[in-house]
Image: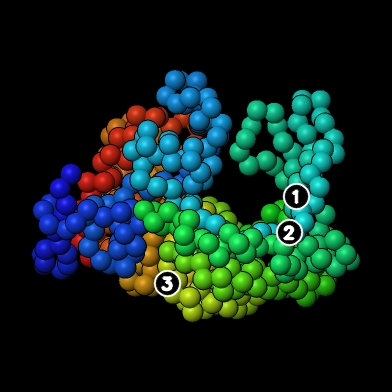
Amino acid sequence: MSGWVACGLGRGLQLQKGMVKQMTNRERAMNILHYQPVDRFPAVHFGYWGELLQEWAEQGKISKDLAGSVGDGNEADRELDRIIGWDFNWQRMVGPANGLFPGFETKVLEELPDGTKRVQNGNGLIERIKPGITSIPSEDDYLLKDREIFETLYKPKMQYAPERIDLEYFRHFNETRPYDVPVGLHLGSVVGQIRDMVSVVGMSYLMYDEDEELFADIVDTYAEMQYQCAKVVLETGAKFDFAHYWEDICFKNGPLLDPDLFDEICAKHYKKRNDLCHQYGIDIISLDCDGVTEKLLPTWFENGVNTMFPIEVGVWGDQFEAARNRFGKGMLGVGGMDKIAFRKDKAAVDEEIERMKRLASLGGFIPCPDHRLMPGSKFELVQYYAEKIKELSYTA
């Protein structure tokens, strides 16, 4: 395939075939997010639900061994990229052990007549796991209900310890990491992982507990440990293309917690961690949050998070263009492609590609399905999208 050339056309840069050298996918992604020319757009994805991979195996699209082996960024994931035509998975990140350390014992507490199991997981959350279902289990109960439990069972697991970090791995990271795709440093989570420990209901009770400082103390303790982990990793000299948070604290009607309380308790932790990243030359900081994120964007953006991901579409429609209009060109995006189109037909995928063209023309935006591909997604439509998205032109 020939390269592309950036030519001045009216308001910006229009890429045309001809002169720009062929780039790696790392160069493409970083150039787009820095408003620089690219030879073409990369075909980026966000992984799959396990049920979909099993469906594709049963349909003969991929092998059963491959279906059972795919994980974000691993060799099986890269093999599936080659089969489908993807360039890379944005979820290619590494990081320290910045969760509960050690985690709680995972154990079955009860088995119900229909085969559903009540299981205490590594976060101390009790879930109902139904046989044959690999997506998110339902939350049933949780351990972290008061200060005594926090101080005795959780706080010791939220402390920094040298054992959390494989120093030798990170000291040699620059020699072993791939340079053809972007690789991120996973910074953990300020609130999302705490929500995972206590459920949505439990977090609501903690925020309004009669012990008014309890929720803030939990957040502060956990955040300080994650900051120390990131600091030690960066001090090894390991180089990353971006940094990333996982939160998932919004749903279809907005945030799961009060935006003012969120800002009061959490803003300082984003700023501290993001300032650290800036000191080590990381200027792309993405954050994964599903749902309608509008009311939390100011806290994130004003404290150093500058890349929305995966920009879930849902019934509420596109969120990126409104965010760009609100915050300016400093607000970047990876995502925004409505994954539901893969369950429909070619016309639906074409419609999404046209919408991606418009968003890509804003600059600083990389199209990507807005979540993991779900059961019912048609293999041939995914292949079609991966091929066509590479043909996008770029106006900055």
The residue at 58%/59% (across/down) is: 169
Quadrant where the C terminus sits is bottom left
Left or right relative to 184: residue 2: left
Q: Report which quarter residue 213 is drawn in.
A: bottom right
Residue type of the residue flagged with mark 1? Gly
Secondary structure type for disc 3: loop
Relative depth, front residue between 23 and 90: 23
- Residue 92, image x, y percentages: 48, 52
Mark 2 touching mark 1, by CB under 8 A?
Answer: yes
Residue density around tag 2, few if under 14, some if 14–19, many if 20 or more, within 10 Å? many
Q: Earlier in the sequence, mark 2 or mark 1?
A: 2
Q: Which residue is mark 2?
A: 100
Q: Earlier in the sequence, mark 3 or mark 1?
A: 1
The residue at 16%/54% (across/down) is: 4
Left or right relative to 213: residue 29: left
- Residue 214, image x, y percentages: 78, 71
Residue type of the residue flagged with mark 3? Asp
Query: For residue 283, which numbered disc appears in the image?
Result: 3
Query: For residue 109, which numbered disc appears in the image?
Result: none
Q: Using the numbered discs, state the Cα–Cα distance from disc 2 to disc 1 in whole angstroms.
A: 8 Å
The residue at 52%/24% (across/down) is: 64
Q: Which residue is mark 1?
A: 122
* 83 relative to 328, above or below: above
- Residue 376, image x, y percentages: 46, 30
